[in-house]
Image (cartoon, rainbow, N blue to C red):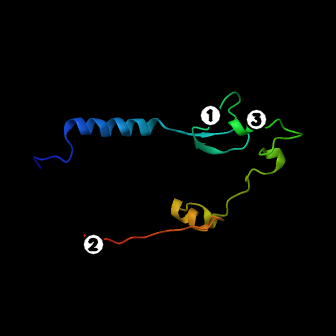
Amino acid sequence: PNDPALRPPEKDLVNNFRAALANIKLETCSTCFECAFDISLKGGRECGRCRADKGDPVKKWSVENKVHPSHEVPACLKGLTEIEEMLIARVKPIMQIRYTKG
């Protein structure tokens, strides 16, 4: 069509936004294996919570304390979508579905 949905300046803004999103990466702590955005990893790639934990005698969220879920995932649970994972999580899932015409 001759009338695009976005004007060139708006298209540039959308492209800049997409480029900024592409630069955001998940970070993983080497001690507690927490995986999140911007958890300020430092030193040995530890998150702030693990750096503050002095380890008396072991760090609270470490593998040595047996709190890391390093067990094997059953075959029936592999390959689930995010929605399916949320629905079977041990939390109360709330889902709202709205239907619209058109």
Residue behind mark 1: 40
Classify 10 Å Cα crowding around label 3: few (below 14), some (14-19), many (20 and above): few
Q: Amino acid at mark 1?
A: Ser
Check contact, mark 2 vs mark 3: CB within 8 A.
Answer: no
Res 54 quadrant in image = top right
Tally of numbered discs: 3
Q: Amino acid at mark 2?
A: Lys
Q: Which disc is residue 101 wearing?
A: 2
Residue behind mark 3: 52
- At a point 27% along the width and 35% down the height, the residue shown is 12
- In x, y percent, where is residue 77? 62, 64
- At a point 75% along the width and 50% down the height, the residue shown is 68
Compared to 91, does 56 lie above or below?
A: above
Q: Which quarter shows the C terminus?
A: bottom left
- In x, y percent, where is residue 73? 67, 59
Gap in Å between the C-alphas at discs 2 and 3? 53 Å
- At a point 10% along the width and 46% down the height, the residue shown is 2
Compared to 35, does 101 lie above or below?
A: below
